Image (cartoon, rainbow, N blue to C red):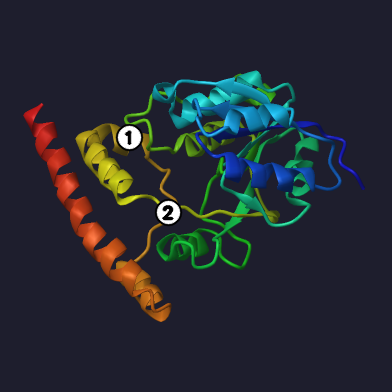
C-alpha cells in the first residue's frame, strides 16, 4: 500500500557531484512513496554540483563554506523545506533498497513520533575501523546504541519549530546536534523510533589531517565539548577488540598506520590542544 505522506529530503553538499548523482538515482527508485521535494544545502561547490542539482529540479540553497556547521545547515534545510516531514540524508549514504524512504517516514502518522532513523551498515572493506564501530552500534539483532542519526533520519517540522538544532557548538565540526535534538524531544513526551527496515550503507574515510585537527580542537575546548556531549556518546569498546578485528581481517595497514601511528599523532595534537588551552 502506498504511503501518502509528503516529505522533503535535505542533502548537504560541497563538491559532491558524483555522490549526489548516485544518491538522487537511488531516491528516484524509491517505491510506495510520493515524489519528495529535494533541498540541497551547497557550500559553494565548484565541481558542477549546484548546476547538476538545479538540472534535476532540486531547490538549491548556496552558503559560504565559512558559514558551515552541522546544526546551522540542518536548521537551514528545515527552514527551506515545504513539507512537514523532513528527511536528512548525508550525500554519501547508499539506500539499500527501494523501500528505504517508505520505512523511514511511515511512522509519522503517529502524532507522538518526533523522529525516525535508519539502520546503517558499513560499506564492506571501505574503512575497517569504522566498519568495526558501525557493527557495534547497529548489530545484526536490529537493536542500536544510537539515540538518533541525521545521516539518514527524519523529523517532524512542526516540532522542529519549537526545538531547533543547537548551533552553539564548541567546534563547528564536532557534531552531536542530532543526539541533543532527540533528547529534548523525548523530554517533551515524543518518540524517537529506530527503523531497521530502512537501511543505508554509510562509511567514511577521514583524512589524517582532519582527525588531527579534531583532536587538537577537542582538547582546546575540552569543557565545552564535555558539556555538549553529555549523555550523547553512543559507543564504548575495548581497543583490544578493535585490534583483534583488524587482525582477523588481515588489515595490517589499518592496524599500524591508521590505528597505531595515527593514534600516536592524535595524542600529540591533543597534547598541543591542552598546552595551548593553558596558555590562554
Q: Measuring from the top left, give residue 92's x and y in whole percent.
A: 56, 47
Q: Is residue 129 left or right of residue 22?
A: left
Q: Nearer the viewer, residue 106 or 216?
A: 216
Q: Residue at x 9, y 38 (%)?
A: 275
From the top left corner, tell me how far across and down residue 21 is, in percent. Answer: 65, 43
User: Which disc is residue 182 wearing?
Assistant: none
| Tag 1 residue | 227
Q: Residue at x 40, y 63 (%)?
A: 129
- 174 above or below 96? above
Residue 193 falls left or right of residue 163 = right
Along the line of sight, which residue is nearer the eye, 206 or 270?
Answer: 206
Q: Is residue 160 above or below residue 266?
A: above
- The answer to whether 109 appears left or right of 173 in the picture is right
Say the numbered circle drawn on residue 205: 2
Q: Nearer the viewer, residue 121 or 192?
A: 121
* Residue 205 visible somewhere in the drawing: yes
Residue drawn at point x = 37 percent, y = 30 percent: 172
Find numbered disc 1 in the image and state the secondary structure of the residue it sits on.
Answer: helix
Residue 166 drawn above or below residue 270:
above
Q: Which quarter of the figure is the C terminus placed in? A: top left
**Picture coordinates of residue 258 (x, y %)?**
30, 62
- The extreme right residue here reads 1
Whether 182 is drawn above or below 233: the answer is: above
Q: Locate residue 270: give its quadrant.
A: top left
Q: For the residues marked 2 and 1, what is the alpha-carbon distance in whole angstroms? A: 27 Å
Locate residue 122, reporting x and y percent.
54, 61
Q: Residues within 10 Å of mark 1 (few under 14, many from 20)?
A: few
- Could you say which quadrant of the image residue 7 lies in? top right
Amino acid at each position: 500500500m502506498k504511503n501518502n505522506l509528503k516529505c522533503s529530503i535535505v542533502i548537504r553538499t560541497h563538491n559532491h557531484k558524483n555522490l549526489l548523482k548516485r544518491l538522487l538515482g537511488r531516491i528516484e527508485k524509491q517505491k510506495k512513496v510520493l515524489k519528495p521535494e529535494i533541498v540541497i544545502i551547497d557550500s559553494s561547490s565548484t565541481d558542477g554540483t549546484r548546476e547538476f542539482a538545479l538540472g534535476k529540479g532540486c531547490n538549491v540553497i548556496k552558503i559560504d563554506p565559512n558559514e558551515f556547521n552541522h546544526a546551522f545547515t540542518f536548521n537551514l534545510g528545515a527552514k527551506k523545506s515545504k513539507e512537514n516531514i523532513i528527511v536528512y540524508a548525508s550525500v554519501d549514504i547508499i539506500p539499500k533498497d527501494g523501500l528505504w524512504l517508505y520505512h523511514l517516514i511511515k511512522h509519522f502518522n503517529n502524532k507522538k513520533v518526533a523522529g525516525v532513523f535508519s539502520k546503517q551498515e558499513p560499506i564492506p572493506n571501505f574503512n575497517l575501523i569504522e566498519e568495526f564501530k558501525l557493527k557495534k552500534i547497529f548489530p545484526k539483532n536490529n537493536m542500536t546504541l544510537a539515540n538518533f542519526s541525521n545521516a539518514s533520519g527524519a523529523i517532524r517540522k512542526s516540532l522542529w519549530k519549537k526545538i531547533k538544532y543547537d548551533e552553539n557548538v564548541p567546534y563547528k565540526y564536532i557534531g552531536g546536534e542530532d543526539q541533543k535534538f532527540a533528547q529534548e524531544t523525548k523530554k517533551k513526551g515524543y518518540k524517537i523510533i529506530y527503523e531497521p527496515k530502512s537501511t543505508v550503507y554509510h562509511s567514511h574515510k577521514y583524512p589524517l589531517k582532519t582527525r588531527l585537527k579534531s583532536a587538537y580542537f577537542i582538547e582546546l575546548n575540552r569543557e565545552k565539548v564535555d558539556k555538549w556531549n553529555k549523555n550523547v556518546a553512543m559507543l564504548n569498546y575495548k581497543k583490544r577488540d578493535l585490534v583483534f578485528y583488524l587482525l582477523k581481517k588481515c588489515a595490517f595497514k589499518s592496524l599500524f598506520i591508521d590505528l597505531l601511528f595515527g593514534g600516536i599523532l592524535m595524542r600529540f595534537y591533543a597534547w598541543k590542544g591542552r598546552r595551548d588551552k593553558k596558555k590562554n
